[in-house]
Image: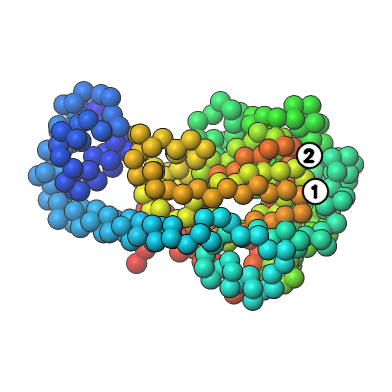
């Protein structure tokens, strides 16, 4: 018997230990091969020496999903949670109270006034000032499957000048995108740009640039699929516009269709017929323009589409009080005790 794909084995195991009727398992299983392969796998589950242990883990997962669903459904009673609030300015204390402590996204609309980048970073300025900088650009995104899981394999070196020239020619495409794999504004070639950004009145730590401040450059039409980050993120728009779809991590069921940090679900077109649990998943939409910043709390799912050629800066260099413990994020194969 050929080995069933990992995602099918996981699906069958969960369905079996959640006591889904066998006829429903056969009807809904994400597998189009011979039913004999499902027969054999279910028989192995039934006779496994680890049945009790696996059953307990599946039950624990189901209870966590239930707790998340309770929180989500309770939140529907509060109209304030149906949108992402916008604030002109927040002090560090206000930022904690309105964003970090409640673990909620917020938009800051007037805290980038000290960013010289807003007026300086024209395409011509970037070409003339740091155009010779060597950068890595993701290629073949329109043809590669799960491209954001293969950033290293799909990234190729070029110059920022060449890439900007391509953006100005095509204007709209998801084929190429400069993402957060260029050591941000701390790299030698891009470092001159660092003096043009601000630090949100002490919310961010100006001493931490290397590895914490990333530059995103691309045409309209670039898409970053639904995913989670392990750190609080302040996403700052310098040029162009981007649309974000955000989903509360309390929707724990989304992890069923997750590989690494990314979900296979299309956030722009949830397939409720195939995945009925998506019916109660609420998406919050935010369109970000130049001079605006979106706080994305650690763990929040988000999907991003560029609506026009854009330049963005994502910043995770929060002061120690606002930082998250990325090291504790559970990854497959890692010991957690």
Left or right of 194: which side holds 321? left
Does the rendering let one see residue 187?
no
Q: CA distance from mark 2 to mark 1?
A: 9 Å
Q: Is residue 301 above or below residue 123?
A: below
Left or right of 179: which side holds 255? left
| Label at residue 189 | 1
Q: Quadrant of residue 30?
A: top left
Q: Quadrant of residue 291?
A: bottom right
Report the residue that reaches farthest toward the left: 47
Residue 279 position, x and y percent, is 38, 43
Circle 2 sits in a helix, a strand or a loop, which is it? helix
For label 2, count other residues whose C-alpha is less than 10 Å away and answer few (under 14), some (14-19) or many (20+): many
Q: Are marks 2 and 1 in contact (CB under 8 Å)?
A: yes
Residue identified by numbered label 2: 160
Residue at position x 72%, y 63% in the image:
88
Residue 23 position, x and y percent, is 15, 33
Residue 118 position, x and y percent, is 83, 52
């Amino acid at each position: 018997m050929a080995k069933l794909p990992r995602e099918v084995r996981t699906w069958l195991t969960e369905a079996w230990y959640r006591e889904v009727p066998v006829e429903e398992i056969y009807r809904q299983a994400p597998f189009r091969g011979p039913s004999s392969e499902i027969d054999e796998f279910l028989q192995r589950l039934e006779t496994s020496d680890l049945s009790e242990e696996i059953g307990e883990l599946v039950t624990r997962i189901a209870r966590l999903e239930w707790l998340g669903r309770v929180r989500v459904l309770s939140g529907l009673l509060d109209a304030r949670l149906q949108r992402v609030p916008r604030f002109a300015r927040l002090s560090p204390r206000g930022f904690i109270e309105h964003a970090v402590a409640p673990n909620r996204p917020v938009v800051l609309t007037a805290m980038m006034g000290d960013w010289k980048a807003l007026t300086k970073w024209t395409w011509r300025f970037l070409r003339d000032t740091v155009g010779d900088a060597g950068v890595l650009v993701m290629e073949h995104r329109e043809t590669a499957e799960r491209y954001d899981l293969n950033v290293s394999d799909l990234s190729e070196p070029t110059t920022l000048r060449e890439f900007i020239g391509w953006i100005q020619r095509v204007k709209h495409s998801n084929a190429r995108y400069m993402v957060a794999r260029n050591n941000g504004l701390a790299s030698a070639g891009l470092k001159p740009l660092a003096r043009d950004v601000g630090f949100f009145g002490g919310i961010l730590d100006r001493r931490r640039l290397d590895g914490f401040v990333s530059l995103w450059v691309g045409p309209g039409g670039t898409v970053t699929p639904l995913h989670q980050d392990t750190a609080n993120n302040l996403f700052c728009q310098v040029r162009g516009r981007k649309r974000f779809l955000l989903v509360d991590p309390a929707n724990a069921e989304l992890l069923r269709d997750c590989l690494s940090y990314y979900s296979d679900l299309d956030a722009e077109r949830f397939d409720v017929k195939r995945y009925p649990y998506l019916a109660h998943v609420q998406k919050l939409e935010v369109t970000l323009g130049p001079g605006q910043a979106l706080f994305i709390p650690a763990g929040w799912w988000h999907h991003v589409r560029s609506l026009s050629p854009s330049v963005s800066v994502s910043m995770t260099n929060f002061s120690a009080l606002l930082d998250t413990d990325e090291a504790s994020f559970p990854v497959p194969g890692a010991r957690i005790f």
